[in-house]
Structures are given as C-alpha cells and as structure tokens.
Amino acid sequence: MAKADKTARAKALAAEFRNAWDAQYPECEPIGYLLKHAFGKRWVRVHSLPGGKRYPTTKPEWDELLDRQNRLIDHVVPSHTPIYMVVNSTSPDNYIFASFDLASIGSLRDGDVRLPSYVFATTWETHTLNPLLTMIAEDVMRAFIVTPHVLIAPYDGGVDVIARDVHEAGALKRTFHPWLSPRSDGC
C-alpha cells in the first residue's frame, strides 16, 4: 500500500474516532485513568486476581487474569463488535500493533503532562487482545477499549468499566461481585 494511502487512512481514522469520542464522551479526554473520575456514577472496578492481588507471579495467576478480563469484556461487548482501542504513551513501532493501522490522535493533555496517544479500530473477539492485556497488566503500556455504550480500561491490577448508565453499573456490580474490591471507595 502506498504511504500516502496509509497516511490518509490514518488521518481519517483519527478524525472518525475524535468525532465519535467528542459526541459520546465529551466529559474528558480519552485517557484511561481519568475515566473513573469523569464517569464516577457509572464506574465499576473489577480486580483481575483473587484478593485484589495486583501482579501475577505464576502461570496459573496469568491464566486467571486473562480469563477474568476476557470474561468481563465478553459480558459487556459481544463478539464481532467493532471497537476502538486507544493507546496512551506508547510508540507506534511496538510489535503488538504490527497488524493494526495505528493512527495518532495527538498528544493529549493531562494537567501538565502531554501523553502521545494513538487509536486503532478492530473487532472484539475473546482472547485476541491478550498480548495487549498482558502488557497493560505488566504496567508496560496504557490502553483502553471504546464502544458507543461502554468504556473498558484495563490497568495493572484489574479493569475499570464505565457502563452505559447507573443501572448497568449496578448490574455489573451484582454479576461480578466476587471480583470487586471490599473497600468502600471501590478501588
């Protein structure tokens, strides 16, 4: 493919994403860890490991982490659903993104910090994003999933979900109660 075609596609994807984001989620910039603050009433945090353990250290714990994250995402995003994946503070040269058309959405401002940010479009399928989920769990990169109805922001320790509304957030809390934090603030 010609470089000009790829550049044009990347610009179109970035504009398409930005228009969709601004229309659906104008409360904050597309930076994963800001979502729980902007959408607190719709926010649900699920831990990736039993007892809220933050980092897996064994193969069974890695299997548990990926199983929980994929089960949660499957619950809120049906298979074959088109999604955007927003990646903050990483290089587009990362091997994880080799099969995706990664488009820059610029350096987003978070206070005094500017985060280089990218987006790619794909379709959700169980376990297809495991390499990316693993890198997020290792705190090597930050990325989150955007759909018209739900935001899913994995982090090193779990997954934050911004549900469509407070009723869906409540349903998620009931469904995934064993995986929630016992803390009153939900963290």
Image (cartoon, rainbow, N blue to C red):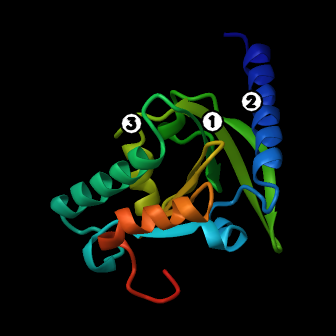
In the rendered structure, the answer to whether residue 78 lies left or right of residue 107 reads: left
Q: Secondary structure at mark 3?
A: loop
Mark 3: amino acid: Thr
Q: Position of residue 91 (x, y in %)?
A: 62, 47
- Pick the front one: 44 or 107: 44
Labels in figure, total: 3
| Mark 2 touches mark 3? (CB < 8 Å) | no
Left or right: residue 113 versus residue 124 is right
From where the camera sits, is residue 139 visible? Answer: no
Location of residue 73 with respect to 34 vertically, above or below: above
Q: Residue at x 58, y 68 (%)?
A: 43
State which tag comes first along the sequence, 2 or 3: 2
Coordinates of residue 126 in the picture (x, y in percent): 36, 38
Q: Give the amino acid at mark 1.
A: Phe
Q: Mark 2 sits on what residue?
A: 13
**In the picture shown, does residue 103 fall above or below 44?**
above
Q: Which residue is mark 1?
A: 120
Return the residue nearer the eye: 140 or 159.
Answer: 159
The percent coordinates of residue 148 (x first, y second) are 66, 42
Find out whether the residues at labels 2 and 1 contact each other: C-beta distance under 8 Å.
yes
Disc 3 designates what residue?
128
- Quarter of the image for residue 121 reads top right
The type of residue carrying mark 2 is Leu
Q: Disc 2 versus disc 3: distance between alpha carbons? A: 21 Å
Quadrant containing the N terminus is: top right
The secondary element bearing badge 1 is classed as strand
The alpha-carbon separation of the residues under discs 2 and 1 comes to 8 Å
Query: Where residue 152 sits: x, y (%)?
Result: 54, 54
